[in-house]
Amino acid sequence: MRQPTSGTTVTLEPDSGPTLAELARQHGLAVSGARPSLGAYVKQLWSRRHFIWAYSNARLIAMYTNARLGQIWQVITPLANAGVYFLVFGLLLGTDRGIDNYIAYLCTGIFIFTFTQQAVTTSARSIGDNMNLIRAVHFPRASLPLTSVLVQLQQLAPSMTVLAVIMLATGEGIDFSWLLLIPALLLQTLFSGGLAMMVARWAARTSDLSQLLPFVMRTWLYSSGVFYSIDRFTGDLPGWVVTVLQFNPMAVYIDLVRYALMDSMGSPPGYLWPAAGGWAVLMGVVGFIYFWRAEEEYGRG
Amino acid sequence: MADLLDAPASGADTRVPTVIVDNLHVVYRINTGGGGRNSPVAALRRIATRKQAPTVREVHAIRGVSFVAHRGEAIGLIGSNGSGKSTLLRAVAGLLPPRRGKVYTQGQPSLLGVNAALMNDLTGERNVVLGCLAMGMSPAEVRAKYDGIVQFSGINERDDFTSLPMRTYSSGMAARLRFSIAAAKSHDVLMIDEALATGDAAFQRRSEERVRELRAEAGTVFLVSHSNKSILDTCERSIWLESGVIRMDGPSTEVVKAYQEYANRR
């Protein structure tokens, strides 16, 4: 089958154009740098799971090496954030009307939003910042935005511990509904991962995006009902705007956690869980495929 | 050494090609940054008129290169600065998409440059572990190979440098560690960009040995270097590239000699 025919003596004469392609086929050579199929890509990514895990740990450790308090900042940062927003929105502007436990309400919103926000903004830099690695070693590039998401997920753990303490301190009781936190965060992670991969591809192409991203994220923050209850501020707005605000994925994920942890919130509206699941699957799948489709181009810079 | 390479050339072709480059053209766009009007107003006008920034220039770096590399070969790439050597390696590694033509390879080629550390803020130790994991090793394999890699790189000879961030390394040390990480795994196709010229004499000797070992493990090695000595020591075959075109392809002794004559004339 694969015996060299007389035609293959041209291997010594590399100038003979089209037969090189034949020679490559005969010996089973593949086109270099070609994008793997989606299934093969998933498999490759799974085989690098140790890399993704080890890299996110390393990044987490490197993050606070220059601070004297070190890892304690993982707890101080969310607390300080919550403190600032409480001062501005709770005490000065008084957006807390109609909310029973405003401190818990606010902290939940900030911690949950910060997770996705940080995951997306750090992913936007993940390709450019790791160009040395990308040009030195072959690995599925989706590992990089996923690492950024995993770093943020690990930072969410101390935030959630702080949140639990705040809940108890402000009079919310522990019950079985707290367990709903786990599926809620899982769905949010899936959503954030998809969005992170999508943004990572955009930012790899146009580096201006990372300048623009903070403004986009801040707009999103102010429209996601972090500091106020969307229902209380939508009186004069047309119906479709209210619907958009309610189905805004970040508002959905924030409310899921609020309903899970806070007794004072009552029971969640019926659309909440389907919306959370829908956003997670949609963004996770679309973001992953979108990132994969440019896999061969990330080394170009 | 000679019989390894020469024997197959005499009879029918029993050599196994590992890299086939077929009429390759690479064009890339570079952001020159300087030059032109770079004020915000000018930039806005460019966006409004959808004109390309004058600071972006296209460089036709590789113009129709074709060659076949075989298993067990070590091929030197020589040529003046900017002749397209590094670009060619990147294209073979699949990191720069070709404008025209194709590159076929056996397995995944691995490119080894010396320009920078892998992850500057992390310690040498973590770079070794992460580099190996990124290449697809399992954690157990990494543990088994870790000591060998550090020892080979020799960065711990004077002090415990593995526990320091890589940005504190000298460029030679970083290059040595990078070479050691990449050389820990046997690659089907290993491409080295000036690595051998960087380390000190002892490391150069060790890395030349390692390159021989890698070749014995049935791979193909490409070496870009401005040191004619390391080309002659490591490679039997050389390709001389000038302005993105192959000037000469043949036994290293002849190609290096011709290149030296050319360089002396200029």
Image (tube, helix red, strand yellow):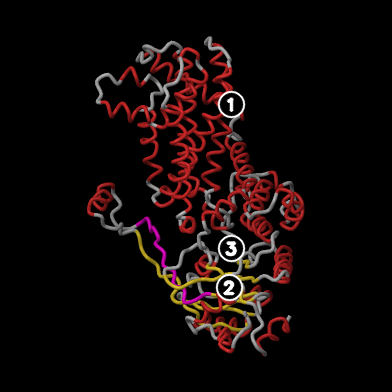
The answer as to whether the residues below labels 3 and 2 share one chain is: yes
Host chain of mark 2: B
Asked whether A269 or B173 is in front, the reply is A269
Tell whether B65 sits left or right of B187. left
Estimate the spatial distance between the alpha carbons at disc 1 and disc 3, rounded to whole Å: 40 Å
Q: Quadrant of the C terminus of chain A?
A: bottom left
Inspect the image, locate mark 1, and give the three-letter code of the amino acid beneath it.
Answer: Pro
Asked whether B20 or B174 is in front, the reply is B20
Q: Position of residue A252 (x, y in %)?
A: 43, 28
Name above or below for residue A89 compared with residue B69. above
Label 2 CA crowd tier, 10 Å (few <14, some 14–19, many 20+): many
Host chain of mark 3: B
Q: Position of residue A53 (x, y in %)?
A: 62, 42
Judged from this view, the residue extending furthest toward the front is A270
Give the residue pinned by disc 3.
B111
Give the residue pinned by disc 1.
A158
SS at mark 2 in the image = strand
The nearer-to-camera label among 3 and 2 is 2
SS at mark 3 in the image = strand
Q: Position of residue A219 (x, y in %)?
A: 35, 31
Estimate the spatial distance between the alpha carbons at disc 3 and disc 2, rounded to whole Å: 14 Å
SS at mark 1 in the image = helix
The boundaries of the magenta stretch are B21-34
Q: Per the image, is A235 magenta?
A: no
Tell whether A228 sits left or right of B115. left
Inspect the image, locate mark 3, and give the three-letter code of the amino acid beneath it.
Answer: Leu
Q: Main secondary structure of the magenta part?
A: strand
